Amino acid sequence: MDIDRIRAAAARLDGHARRTPLLSSPFLDEIAGRRVLVKPECLQHTGSFKYRGARSALSAMDDAVRARGVLAYSSGNHAQGVARAAQEFGVPAVIVMPADAPALKIANTRSLGAEVVLYDRATEDRNALGARLAEERGLSLVKPFDDPEVIAGQGTTGLEIAEDASALGIESAEVLVCCGGGGLTSGIALALEADAPGMRVRPVEPQGFDDTARSLASGEITPHGQPERGLCDAILTPAPGQLTFPILKRLAGPGLAVSDDEAMRAMALAFQRLKIVAEPGGAVALAAALFHGDALEADTVIVTVSGGNVDAATFARALDTL
Amino acid sequence: MDIDRIRAAAARLDGHARRTPLLSSPFLDEIAGRRVLVKPECLQHTGSFKYRGARSALSAMDDAVRARGVLAYSSGNHAQGVARAAQEFGVPAVIVMPADAPALKIANTRSLGAEVVLYDRATEDRNALGARLAEERGLSLVKPFDDPEVIAGQGTTGLEIAEDASALGIESAEVLVCCGGGGLTSGIALALEADAPGMRVRPVEPQGFDDTARSLASGEITPHGQPERGLCDAILTPAPGQLTFPILKRLAGPGLAVSDDEAMRAMALAFQRLKIVAEPGGAVALAAALFHGDALEADTVIVTVSGGNVDAATFARALDTL
């Protein structure tokens, strides 16, 4: 994995991925006690950054391979990203999803033209199911994070952060990234190493699911050991990946963890001050910036809002915290 | 009023106003039965397009005049735009607001450094109050729409629409604009006349407050004649302006009017599909695109979401329509 792969992904994504802006609000700066810039990947196609990695992976495949179709495991955002990218290329997509995934995410994935295969988390082996489907139909697996082309696609977010921050005269910052398996975090870290070496990535996770923070602290991959259930459903991945962790170990600062309540309050403030919709897992980095300032060092913090695929009831509960 | 004034405003706004993207969703296209592109000015500084006009007006003033301070009448979005622009220039801002304006808008205006003077809509004469303040303190009035530099600032929205649509290969479209006094609508109309002559502006208003539609139909300024109270508080202006109406009469297509319920449903769909926060008055153009397709002609419709300053309770009610 190196910067050239990210730049190549950026070239392939040009004209396809949406160029998201950097947002800000003096009201958020005041709460945080420092300058806060927000990269709203909730505004990306399919409502999360996952489209970048999916489009990158599909566009890097040989035409004949891609034409047979793609397979993904996902509880939601990765599924939608892969489904949309496959639809754009006109190739089949099969998405293996837990039967208890949010209904909106399942419906959206189907509406984007994918075949959704549901499984029971308690009784079925997702990997065996997927392997059988892949073999039967000649599908290529698109991993959610531990794949060089996926990491490269997510890393294009970091190229944009570096460019837009530089235009604002910002060369030094902590960059807080909502972190599940570390695809977005490691991709951004590589991009900033090349284009904004004065910036340092710091992963942010939900409390109790801070496997990346623990892994960075111990120096080796350390799963969180919890069932993957919780408010921040997009980023409950058990552990950082074989590809992503070495990148994070080399480049990322210490991890941060926020409570579900803090994530909900950050969603409400993103509504009120930025006019964007963040899902719980997409709001943890903003929550860290707003409510964990003691753990930060830089005068400027840049945070990703990594997704906005949240149901109305959960969002309304977040607004109740205002 | 001509295009050169808009281009000059764009130069003065460069590096200050936020460059908002064009958003889209296949789910909205499906509801509308045509391609829908959304210009989310809710993401603009202060949460509405009004910042553009305010910054344009203040930046066009002589330094000595601006230094004495500015005055504005506004129930909300214009107030915040003027307050922020004045704060950026370090000059005093006095905002005359009705005492029953949304609490969040009053609080935001104060937090942006402005002095807020409240008046009672029923018993006090806003214009007399403002004139007295202006004379006593040497303040310059920044009108909400009927001012060439304000129209020019709002028109920069149209320059961006033309440029971004062209990059997508779109030269022909109906451009639906949320319309109060017509500053944004006339500014966009002038910009498109120059840069995207295949596009036509159409104003969208709340039912019962469709003074611009009636004025366009009758050929002369026709007030709606209602008290300025309703869900879509940002765009209940009694009539188009002396400067804005002749521009609209020359360039705009027939007006459209939507119900409050349609505006609320459009807010909910903007939440669900675009991950943006629209206020009721900022959602009427999207509502027209989604629910009044029979009144539209073009294969592509571009809609402004002109603001996102809505309280949580109203927003939660909108989500209940999903």
Image (spheres, coloured by chain):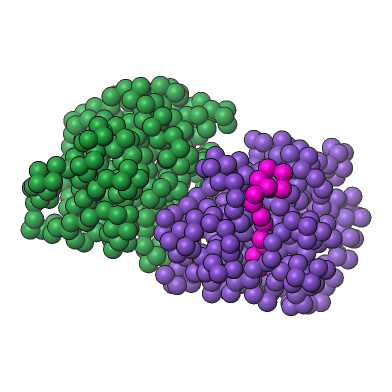
Chain colours: A green, B purple
Task: In this rendered view, identify the residue nearer to me: A153 or B31.
Answer: B31
Q: Residue at x 71, y 59 (%)?
A: B252
Q: Is residue A52 left or right of residue B103?
A: left
Q: Position of residue A304 (x, y in %)?
A: 42, 42
Q: Is residue B43 left or right of residue A61?
A: right
Tell me which corner region of the image, top left, top right, bottom left or bottom right, holds residue B5: top right
Which range is magenta?
A: B193-205
The number of numbered badges drawn on the structure is: 0
Q: From this viewpoint, is residue B135 visible? A: yes
In the image, farthest residue toward the right: B135
Q: Position of residue B161 (x, y in %)?
A: 61, 46
Q: Is residue B195 magenta?
A: yes
Q: Position of residue A102 (x, y in %)?
A: 28, 61
Q: Is residue A122 magenta?
A: no
Q: Is residue B228 left or right of residue A34?
A: right
As drawn, A4 above or below A224: above
As drawn, A113 above or below A143: below
As drawn, A144 above or below B94: above
Tell me which corner region of the image, top left, top right, bottom left or bottom right, holds residue B72: bottom right
Q: Residue at x 82, y 48 (%)?
A: B1
